[in-house]
Image (cartoon, grey):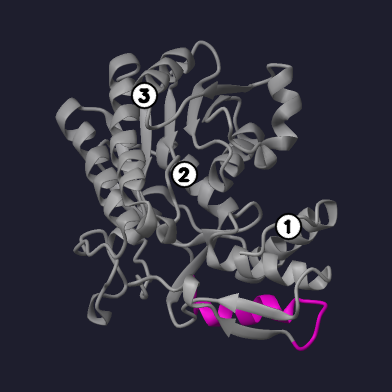
């Protein structure tokens, strides 16, 4: 794609973990203008370091909207006029989706349709990344491991069902309208700025609170037997950058994930081993258990790695250490945080 001026990228969910790290990556490795979608009430913690650039209109621009509001999405896309689109925004917590299924389905399925319809209307030649999820595969029998792109969908939560819709909507716009839209099913990815509703970040936050004397030395947990493949978020956003720049193919769909495989309990043991407090105990909290769980999340990523040449570089141990240090830093500045 040739450009007389620097390309523009539109990132929905800019203030999330992935969106903020993607902005950092693109600012460091490209000359692109970064246009981000956020709700007017979105916390700015994850992009706090970018606020001076926003104020100076230095390559970072904010657009306010909501995936549930068609007019705001249309206005934001028309204003940004992007060459590249990363649709990352979503109601992304599987556990929350059990108590808020309608909101999850509307935000994730219809929200994706609103974004793609606006891009189709205003920038039909943009290269688009639609972020689905490994959760679409859900309950996978062991004989189908590792999970490849053609594995049957068996979603295990309203969130996962919504991401099946997201996946199909993304591919539909490529096939029906010839858009260069691609779908990814990203497996577990984490690191600094990870939301505290997700297991590894919740554990790291609790450990940091224990170290600061805010909690007794007991970590509340859910299902520790679930098998996961972990990837650092900073490797994940490099993969996303390569997705849209290395011979992008409209309608393509890829599994992306790390190479470190372990049970959730092993991940917790790693974090506890990094703590400055000894004798930390573990206690199952029934509220942290899902009615059903996608418990075997092991991807076959060859389709993506062979197409792009991408491979992860950040070791699991550094990811966990950086995640724990992130929470230590947050709580040192403000100890008034929820225990969850």
Report which quarter residue 335 is drawn in: bottom right
Q: Which of marks 1 and 3 is in front?
A: 1
Residue, disc 3:
126
Please state the horizontal and vertical placement of residue 158, each as a whole percent of the image.
30, 56
Q: How far apart are marks 2 and 1 (CA)?
A: 23 Å
- Magenta residue span: 259-279
Q: Name the residue under label 2.
A: 240
Q: Residues within 10 Å of mark 1 (few under 14, many from 20)?
A: many
Q: In this view, does 41 lie above or below 140?
A: above
Tell me where residue 29 sits by quadrant: top right
Residue placed at 75% from the left, 78% from the top? Answer: 216
Mark 2 near mark 1, Cβ–Cβ under 8 Å? no
Q: Quick one: 103 or 312, which is closer to the camera?
A: 103
| Residue at 56 percent of width and 43 percent of height | 16
Closest to the camera, between mark 2 and mark 1, is: 1
Q: Mark 1 points at which residue?
A: 326
Q: Earlier in the sequence, mark 1 or mark 3?
A: 3
Q: Which of 47 and 3 is in front in this view?
A: 47
Total marks in image = 3
* The C terminus lies in quadrant: bottom right
Give me the residue at 45% from left, 55% from top: 93
**Is-magenta flag for residue 276?**
yes
Horizontal and vertical percent position of residue 339 = 66, 64
Dot 3: element: loop
**Residue at the (60%, 58%) spot, across then down:** 196
User: Quick check: is 287 in the magenta stretch?
Assistant: no
**Residue most toward the bottom?**
279
In the rendered image, which quarter is residue 274 located in?
bottom right
Q: Where is residue 170 in the image (x, y as percent from the top left)?
A: 27, 38
Q: Is residue 285 visible from the viewing direction of this image?
A: yes
- Which quadrant, please, contains the N terminus? top left
Give the secondary structure at mark 1: helix
């Amino acid at each position: 794609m040739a450009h007389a001026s620097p390309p523009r990228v539109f990132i929905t969910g800019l203030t999330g973990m992935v969106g903020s790290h993607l902005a950092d990556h693109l600012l460091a490795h490209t000359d692109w203008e970064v246009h981000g979608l956020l709700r007017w009430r979105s916390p700015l913690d994850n992009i706090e370091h970018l606020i001076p650039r926003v104020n100076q209109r230095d390559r970072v621009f904010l657009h306010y909207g909501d995936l549930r509001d068609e007019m705001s999405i249309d206005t934001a896309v028309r204003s940004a006029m992007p060459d590249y689109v990363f649709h990352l925004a979503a109601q992304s917590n599987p556990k929350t989706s059990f108590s808020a299924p309608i909101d999850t389905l509307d935000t994730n399925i219809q929200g994706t349709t609103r974004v793609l319809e606006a891009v189709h209307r205003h920038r039909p030649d943009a290269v688009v990344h639609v972020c689905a999820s490994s959760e679409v595969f859900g309950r996978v029998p062991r004989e189908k491991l590792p999970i490849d792109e053609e594995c049957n969908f068996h979603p295990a939560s309203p969130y996962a069902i919504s991401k099946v819709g997201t996946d199909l909507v993304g591919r539909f716009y490529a096939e029906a309208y010839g858009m260069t839209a691609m779908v990814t099913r990203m497996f577990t990815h984490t690191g600094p700025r990870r939301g505290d509703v997700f297991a590894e970040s919740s554990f790291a936050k609790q450990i940091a609170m224990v170290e600061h004397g805010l909690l007794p030395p007991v970590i509340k947990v859910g299902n520790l037997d679930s098998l996961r493949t972990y990837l650092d978020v900073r490797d994940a956003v490099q993969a996303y950058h390569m997705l849209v720049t290395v011979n992008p193919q409209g309608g393509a769909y890829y599994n992306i994930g790390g190479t470190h495989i372990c049970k959730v309990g092993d991940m917790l043991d790693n974090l506890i081993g990094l703590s400055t407090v000894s004798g930390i105990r573990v206690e199952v909290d029934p509220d942290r258990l899902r009615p059903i769980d996608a418990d075997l999340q092991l991807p076959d990523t060859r389709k993506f790695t062979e197409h792009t040449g991408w491979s992860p570089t950040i070791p699991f141990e550094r990811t966990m250490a950086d995640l724990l240090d992130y929470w230590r830093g947050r709580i040192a500045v403000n100890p008034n945080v929820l225990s969850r």
